[in-house]
Amino acid sequence: MSFPFISAEEAASYIKNGDNVGTSGFTASGTPKLVTVALAEKARQHHEKGEPFKINLYSGASTNDYVDGALTRADAINQRMPYQGTPCTREAVNEGRMNYYDPHLSHVCQDMRYGFLGDLDVAIVEVTEMNPSGDVILGAGLGQSPTIVQMAKKVIIEYSSYYRTSFRGFHDNYVPLDPPHRREIPIYRPQDRIGDTVLHIDPKKIIGVVPSNESESIRSFTQLNDTTRAIGHNVASFLAAEMKAGRIPPEFLPIQSGVGNVANAALHGLADNPDIPQFEMFTEVVQDGVMELMEKGKCSFASTCALAFSDDAMLRFMDDIDFYRDKLLMRPSEISNHPEVVRRLGLIAMNTALECDIYGFVNSTHVNGSQMMNGLGGSGDFCRNAYLSIFLCPSIQKGGALSAIVPMVTHVDHSDHSVRVIVTEQGVADLRGLSPTQRAQRIIENCVHPDYKEIMWDYLKIAGKGHMPHNLQAAFALHQAFKETGDMRNVDFSRYV
């Protein structure tokens, strides 16, 4: 069966107002580049005529400006799930112009198959190879692709010629059976393959093929600074001490690392510490730093959902792709983040926090409790089930006007039951086995910036009694001080005594 080549505009014509649309990829990697831009233009034309046009957009994770950016600016998204990272999309969510559902990433695919989200009308999937029977090779991100091509009524293919070499062999396409027929997921080491390298799409669903030659448009991370370098050093020193104490085996444990500059710094810290042995990764995203770890021989293998390399690093990867063929494997997000596998492998999970409180609660998503930043992502999948769950953040932001450690977080994504270790550039707070008051004392002593230590001790003095002491009037006093004066250090607890 041959599939017609069509324009992005023709492909967009098959998508109707109110459709549920799923996209391939995970982060910017492997996402559509052309059809969504054409769809945004279609929405503008409808709006100029006074006609409604919005879709419900379900992606693997965040996307890029081709998807979230273009569609948001065209006011073409009604419901968004499960993660976003584009500034204009964030603004639309916080202004109430877009409905945003923020689930754990490991739940998304099964929620679709269980019917919780309704029918999937269209899937837009980027591929790098395909044949007439509907077998395709995906690109740099796998995401939810196996589920959306199974669920969708219609499939639009974006055929990318950007990649100079084949991704064949890098994917492990696998969809578990649904209850009550589900079996164990047979992954016992990060390199275990359980699915297919190719993804089969029912050829009867494929509307057409849109040629593409666009890059992922991922920028390089900023260079390490003194703060992020200190965080990385503290993490590595802590893990080396844990290994020396026998709480991490001598062959080490697989690493999961979140996204961003702080997470990247943690990986650099592991690479620079001579006491950390060669290790494997089982994670949802690998970034530029993982390439460096592999080149140095520090990381021997990484299971991931996406190769979220900057454009420059992706070019290097393609030039030397054979070096990585036995070192990288991409899985669906449902598997890369699956609690069963996370628990079995005994991961060391390292994720970033917006703010932590003195009792070990973590806010990963909301500024001041109400303004969504990006979303929960996979941090909850890993945090709750990891062998060792570590959260990283600088102790201060905005030149010291904000403390990342506060008496009470304004939004809870990860409770004190799941958070084992908190690390800032100031030090490490190991919270295992401690009561709430003991946790508060350790966090204040080890992780809080010197400008805020006395402030936190003062809060504990007025917090009162109880298993987890809190003065509910003063719990958000630092946030209120920042709102009123622009600096949390101007807090005045005497108002609350």
Image: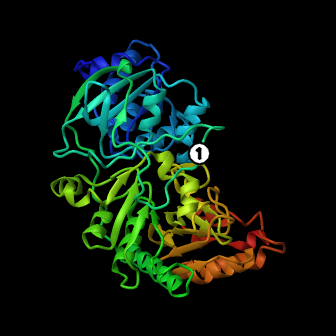
Q: Which amino acid does label 1 sit on?
A: Arg
Name the one closer to the observer, 190 or 275: 190
How many numbered discs sit on the rendered protein? 1
Q: Is 11 displayed left or right of 442 in the figure?
A: left
Name the one closer to the observer, 128 or 95: 128
**Residue 367 seen in this snapshot:** no
Q: Mark 1 points at which residue?
A: 183
Tell me residue 434's x, y (percent). 71, 78
Q: Is 383 displayed left or right of 316 in the figure?
A: right
Name the one closer to the observer, 74 or 180: 180
- Residue 483, located in which quarter of the rendered image? bottom right
Please give the name of the residue rendered at 57% of the width and 47% of the height, measured from the top-left corner.
104
Tell me residue 263's x, y (percent). 42, 65
Does 407 appear above or below 89?
below
Tell me residue 3's x, y (percent). 26, 20
- Residue 134, located in which quarter of the rendered image? top left
Around disc 1, counting alpha carbons within 10 Å, would you say few (fewer than 14), some (14 to 19), or many (20 or more)?
few
**Residue 158 seen in this snapshot:** yes
Colour convention: rainbow
- Residue 411, located in which quarter of the rendered image? bottom right
Name the one closer to the observer, 89 or 332: 332
Tell me residue 221's x, y (percent). 31, 61
| Image quarter in which the C terminus is found | bottom right
Does 457 appear above or below 6?
below
Please give the name of the residue rendered at 60% of the width and 41% of the height, measured from the top-left corner.
182
Please give the name of the residue rendered at 65% of the width and 69% of the height, measured from the top-left corner.
360
| Image quarter in which the N terminus is found | top left
